[in-house]
Amino acid sequence: MLNRRQFLEAARGAACGCAACPLLAIFAPQARAADAGEVDAGAVEDYRRAGVYDLTKQGRPFFLVNRKGRLYAVSSTCTHKRVTLKAAKDGSGFKCPRHGSLFDLSGKVTKAPARKSLPRHAIRLDASGTRVLVDTSTSFRPSDWDDPAASVELKSE
């Protein structure tokens, strides 16, 4: 059994530990660094065929979609409860396995409970035009999907 002094010292230590929690995010950003920033998604040639490319299987937080000759990166995190989405087997969009939200290929909600569209990440080709680079730290909402940094045009061969 703790005496009064031991209890107060333990409580003070716990309070200091709780107060330091926000500092952990500042001094230990490694966990977030893996999910944010520019990542090499692979060779442009790998994405020439129209359809959905599920990069979540490689630990990436996005899908690549080639639609009408444009390639864009759609977040793979449901806007309802932050669950990792699954690509629909028929290639029509994305589904939340936990709550059933559905999103079309553009990222727009087609079935609730989600209410917000999926953001798109900035995407570009490297200087040689052969590699796809996705910047997960920059996102675009539907009103900005026409921004030149929200998709890249894939030139026909």
Image (cartoon, helix red, strand yellow):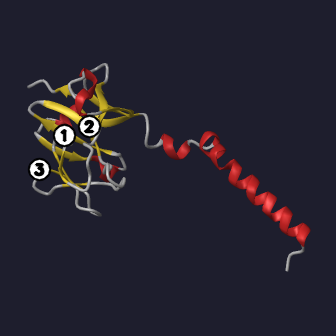
As shown in the figure, which amino acid type bears the numbered disc 3? Ser
Q: Amino acid at mark 2?
A: Ala
In the image, 25 versus 56, the foreground residue is 25
- Give the CA distance from mark 1 to mark 2: 6 Å
Quick one: quadrant of the C terminus?
Answer: top left
| Residue at the (59%, 44%) spot, across then down | 25
Q: Residues within 10 Å of mark 2 (few under 14, many from 20)?
A: many
Please state which of residues 114 and 63 is positioned toward the viewer in this rendering: 114
Q: What residue is drawn where x is 52% and y is 47%? A: 31
Q: Secondary structure at mark 3?
A: loop
Q: Pointers 1 and 2 in contact (CB under 8 A)? A: yes
- Residue in the image at 25% along x and 42% along y: 117
Earlier-in-chain disc, 3 versus 1: 1
In the image, what residue type sits under mark 1?
Answer: Val
Q: Which mark is residue 65?
A: 1
Residue 2 image-quadrant placement: bottom right
Q: Which residue matches tag 3? A: 92
Image coords of residue 105 (percent x, y): 15, 43
**CA distance for labels 3 and 2:** 15 Å
Give whichever of discs 3 and 2 has the lower sequence position: 2
- Up/down of 131 relative to 103, above or below: above
How many badges with numbers are in the image? 3
Counting residues from the start of the chain, the first of labels 1 and 2 encountered is: 1
